[in-house]
Structures are given as structure tokens and as C-alpha cells.
Amino acid sequence: MSDPVPMSSPSLVGSRLRQWGDAPLLLLIATGMLLGSMLPMSRVARAEGWSPLAFAFWPALGSGLVLAFAGGRSLSGTPEARPVLLYSLIAGVLSVAVPNSVTFIVMQFVGTSVTSLVYTLPPLFTYAFAWGLGIERYRPLRLAGIVVGLVGAALLVLGRSSAPGTGSSWWLALALCTPISIAAGNVYRKLRMPKGVPASLLAGGMLLGGALALLPLLVMNGGLPRPGMAGWGVILAQCFFTSLGYRVYFHFQKVADPVYFSQFGYVVSATGVLSGLVFFNEHLTLPMLLSMGVILAGIAMVNARPRAA
């Protein structure tokens, strides 16, 4: 990437990301942890009076404006507007509006454990989509690593001692929209990402596209709630995490293939569990420790390079 580094937070992050360009594992962990903040923050937001759709909309809008402004400042030349706008809207629907709104709605009915579990499924759907489109070839070790990571993540969330009931099968079926949409977004962005556009601008456009798609749903469901100052503090905090998370997210997308990229969902699940331990008085069990080891093994298998013949 060739963005200049003005004195703005997203661009300073961009400078650091250029140093991490050859360290996709660091980008994997950073992306998952930053975006995984939405799971514990959504619990706080619900307690402060935010509806699921409002909590999906306002951080997307706020962080999208910040990133688009930073990306616009570092833009050299004027890219063709129509492809960027179309890309932003489609990527925003697939990667922001659908998964975030479904996640925050379903979480109320199936619990946080199942919600965390769905974030372990995108690598399998991404591999299937990428393989079907011919942008990912069959690699037995990679497929095995994805399955191992999926098993480890499933053990992690199912081993939580505080896991609530799963609710009706209809809500579980709806929850599957999240990993399918995320996987479709992973492949779409890799195939259609506009060339020569700063990562901050792409990230901001995607978030604004997602916010635009969510706006009619928010209006139809009662519009803006009236939380207190603490409620707006939750939104501002999530805007901070979302801005940094999606800035790293787009850099990671540029340096990794869709399947490896999609594994950040494992880290999202782990972040949800660890935040429960730190902030919500949940307890770490031996099965959880073992499952974390299985996840790391799966990531190592996917990252392993095949031996030269």
C-alpha cells in the first residue's frame, strides 16, 4: 500500500500495517480481536437500551464516516465513482448489514454461545464458494486445518459453563445467514475490490453501505431509541473498535487469500469467550483450554506451506 501517513489515527494504523504485511497471523489475530469486541459490547448496549438494529447501525455509520474521511484525505487521483459505490453497497450488505443485524437479533433468542459458534463457520463456506468459483484449489491439508479449527471453536463455545438454551430451530436456521453472508462477502471483496483505492476508503465505504442498508429497517422498527449518556458512550467505544478493526480487516484482505482471511472468525469466537471471563464473571474450564489449543493447531495447518516436489 502507498498511502501517505497524515496525523490521523486510521492512517497511523496504516503505517503500522505496512510493517505487518508479511505477518498475516498477526493480522488474523488483530482483526478477530477488534471485531470480536462487538459480542461483549452488544450485551452492554442491550442493558443501556439499544435495540439490535440500532447497535448494528450507529457504529457502522460513525466508524464508516471516520474511515471514509481518512481514506479521502490520502486518496491520490479520483477513482471512478460508480464501481466504488456499487462495491461499497454490495460489500456493506453482505459483510455488515446482514451478519451484524442477524447476530444481534438472534443473540436474544439463542444465547451468546450459539452466536459465537456461527463465527466459526465462515471458513467452510468461504472455502466452498472459492473452490466452486475456481479461485481456491483443493488442498487436503488446508481443508483438514479448517475442519480442525471449526471443531476447536465449537468445543470452545459449547464448553462454556454459562451457555444458555438454544431456542427454536427457526432462530437457529436464521443464525446460519451470518456465516453464509460473511463467506459470500469474503469472496466478493476479493474478486471485486477496486484497484488503487486506499484501504481506509474501502472500509469506510463498506460500513456506510451497510448503514444505508440498515436505515430503512431501523426506521420501520421505531427509529432512534433514547438512551442516556452511558448508552452513547457504548456507541462511541464500539465506533473506535470498529474503525480500527475494519482498517486492519481490509489490509488483511489484501495480503491473504479468502480462506485464510475467513479464519478471523475463530478469533472472534475466542474473544467472545475471553471477554466473558474478564467482564462477565464466567469461568475457564479445562475443555476450553483444550479447545483453544485445537484452534491454534487448525490455524497452523491452514498456514502451512506445501513442500516443493
Image (cartoon, grey):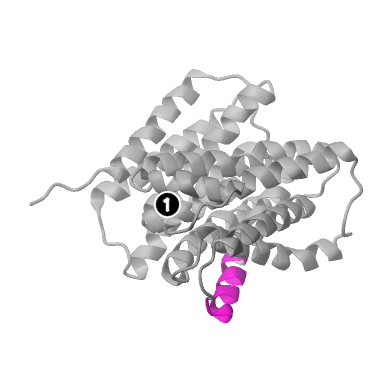
Quadrant of residue 95 within the rendered picture: bottom right
Which residue shows up at 54% across the image and 66% down it? 75
Locate residue 186, reporting x and y percent: 47, 60
At 54% across and 38% down in the image, what residue appears? 33
Element under disc 1: helix
How many C-alpha atoms fall within 10 Å of the one at disc 1: few (<14), some, or many (≥20)? Answer: many
The prevailing secondary structure element of the residues shown in magenta is: helix
> 116 or 210, which is in the foreground?
210
Residue 263 appears in view = no
Tell me which corner region of the image, top left, top right, bottom left or bottom right, holds residue 133.
bottom left
- Nearest to the observer: residue 174 or residue 28: 28
Q: Residue at 67%, 63% (x, y): give it.
A: 208
Instruction: Determine if the magenta segment contains residue 67.
Output: no
Instruction: Locate the N terminus by quadrant.
Output: bottom left
Magenta stretch: give its range: 79-92
The type of residue carrying mark 1 is Phe
Decide: is 192 above or below 158: below
Residue receiving disc 1: 261
Q: How many labels does the image show?
A: 1
Quadrant in the rendering for residue 138: bottom left
Q: Position of residue 50 (x, y in %)?
A: 82, 46
Which residue extends farthest left? 309
Residue at screen point 65% across, 67% down: 209
Up-down: is 181 above or below 266? Answer: below
Frontmost residue, 165 versus 127 = 127
In reply to whether residue 82 is colored magenta, the answer given is yes
Give the left or right position of residue 307, taking residue 98 as reference.
Answer: left
Say above or below: 260 vs 137.
above
State the image coordinates of residue 308 (x, y, percent, origin top left). 11, 50
Query: In the rendered image, is residue 9 in sight?
Result: yes
Task: List x then y, in percent, for residue 129.
Answer: 41, 64
